[in-house]
Image (cartoon, grey):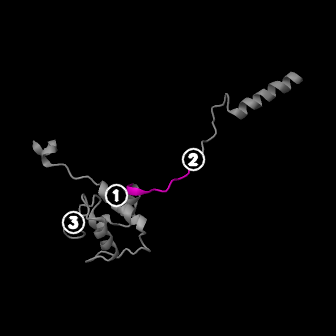
Amino acid sequence: MQRLFLALAGLGLAAGLGVGSAVAAPAKAAPAKAASGAAHGREIYVSYGCYQCHGYQGQGSSSAGPKLAPGPMPLDAFTRQMRNPRDRMPVYTSKVVSEGDLNDLYAYLQTIPKAKAVADIPLLNQ
């Protein structure tokens, strides 16, 4: 009886440690980290609909919003335009877009690379 008890206890311990079991306990997910910087700026750019006038790459449009990238205007001019826009752009007060979010949005625009030169695109050189 004592051997049976020890054998069952050993199996229980092995099962509790996951030994011999194909089913493992799920790993705890890492806590979600708040997005910041350029990645957060891209989220803002898309969620606020900036792409609708300025394009997904900030290239602008002759009929809607001007070019924002690559090579965005200086940050202070960008901030003035966001807070007190000219033409048809909506106003983005600090209650709507915080200073941190505005800086992240600007950081995203700075990451947009220049387009390749025509000479560097093989298909266009055939």
Q: Which residue is mark 2?
A: 29
Q: Is residue 46 visible?
A: no
Quadrant, the N terminus: top right
Numbered range of the magenta stretch: 29-38
Asked which secondary structure carries label 2, the reply is loop
Front residue (pair 8, 114): 114
Q: Residue at x 31, y 69 (%)?
A: 76
Q: Is residue 100 visible?
A: yes
Q: Which residue is mark 3?
A: 61
Task: Inspect the image, locate mark 1, and give the three-letter code of the amino acid beneath it.
Answer: Tyr
Q: Earlier in the sequence, mark 1 or mark 2?
A: 2
Q: Earlier in the sequence, mark 3 or mark 2?
A: 2
Real-space Cα separation, disc 1 to disc 2, in angstroms:
28 Å
Q: Which of the numbered marks, if any, corresponds to residue 108?
A: 1
Percent of width and height locating residue 72: 26, 62
Q: Is residue 53 above or below residue 120?
A: below
Task: Inspect the image, locate mark 3, and give the three-letter code of the amino acid beneath it.
Answer: Ser
Of badges 1 and 2, the one in the foreground is 1
| Label 1 crowd bin: few (<14), some (14–19), many (20+), radius 10 Å | many
Asked which secondary structure carries label 1, the reply is helix
